[in-house]
Amino acid sequence: MAIRIITDSASDLELSDAKDWQVQVVPMSIQFGDRSYLDGLDLSKTEFYQKLLQGDESPTTAQPAPADFLQLFESARDAGDQVVVILLSSVLSGTFQSAVIAREMCGYADIHLIDSRSASTGIQLLVWEACRMRKAGASAQEIAQRLETLKDRVRIFAAIDTLEYLRRGGRLSDFQAGLGTVAKIKPLITVRDGAVSIIRKSFGLSAAVKQLGALLEEHPADRDFPFFLLYSDDIARSDLLLPKLESLGYYAEGLRRASLGPTIGTHIGPGALGIVYLEQE
């Protein structure tokens, strides 16, 4: 009996990593005008940001349908495999509900659904731990129980250029988005309790980097887990974080870089940088 690990493309897991980790990825849909794309399959991250920056059309996202999960669940059921499914926060998307419906339709008890209450590489951290435990011989139930205890320790802190994309996607109100626009500041956001919120504001990028360092000092990382430098369209921007992180003892060779894919990038936009990690107990 094997254990299958499934996530969605909002995890921003690279296809090469998904193959190496033996993880199945269910894609979200990205809509530009009348053209629909599958995140990571027929729309790359580079192509997405090129289209986004052209500014002709605002993209929208759509969750996978229950049928997209049902096919994978039935395959696992027929093979007698256990399944662990780690998905985008249910506060941000209906993806988790689609998986719940698919499990009911499948009628198979050995499917364990995890609402990550997170996004992007925050989901990846949980996927990484699931893969590590699978390799160590844990059961699907043991993996699921462990992830439920870990997910509240996932920390995402990011500085973004504008709140406009979050406003367009309905993740922030017009009033909240206006606070950042009027003051010409760099908002710092996080994902807590499954939702996006503004936690701090800074004047300029260098101040934002200092704020990110301060947040890391307040919420130290667990060194037994990966630590991600997060960026949207410009990998060079993540270099701005290195001196601050190294001053806190987080050295470049121990850091991983990850870019926001189309699903999350639709709501964050270009110019973002941040840190994602698991906080110490």
Image (cartoon, rainbow, N blue to C red):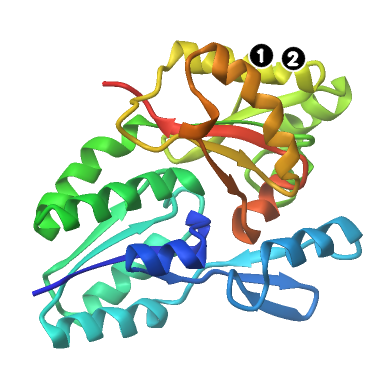
| Residue 56 seen in the figure | yes
Which residue corresponds to mark 1? 210
- The answer to whether 168 appears left or right of 251 in the picture is right
Q: Give the CA separation, mark 1 to mark 2.
A: 5 Å
Q: Which mark is residue 207?
A: 2
Question: Dot 1: within a 10 Å radius of its alpha carbon, few (fewer than 14), some, or many (20 or more) residues?
Answer: some
Of the residues shown, which amino acid type is indicated by label 1?
Answer: Lys
Disc 2 element: helix
Quarter of image, res 220: top left
Q: Position of residue 113 (x, y in %)?
A: 26, 59
Choose between 239 and 191: the one closer to the eye.
239
Of the residues shown, which amino acid type is indicated by label 2?
Answer: Ala
Q: Position of residue 231 (x, y in %)?
A: 66, 42
Q: Which mark is residue 56?
A: none
Classify 237 as above or below 263: above
Q: Which quarter of the image is occupied by the N terminus?
A: bottom left
Quarter of image, res 99: bottom left
- The answer to whether 81 appears left or right of 211 in the picture is left
The mark total stands at: 2
- The answer to whether 150 appears left or right of 210 in the picture is left
Q: Are marks 1 and 2 in contact (CB under 8 Å)?
A: yes
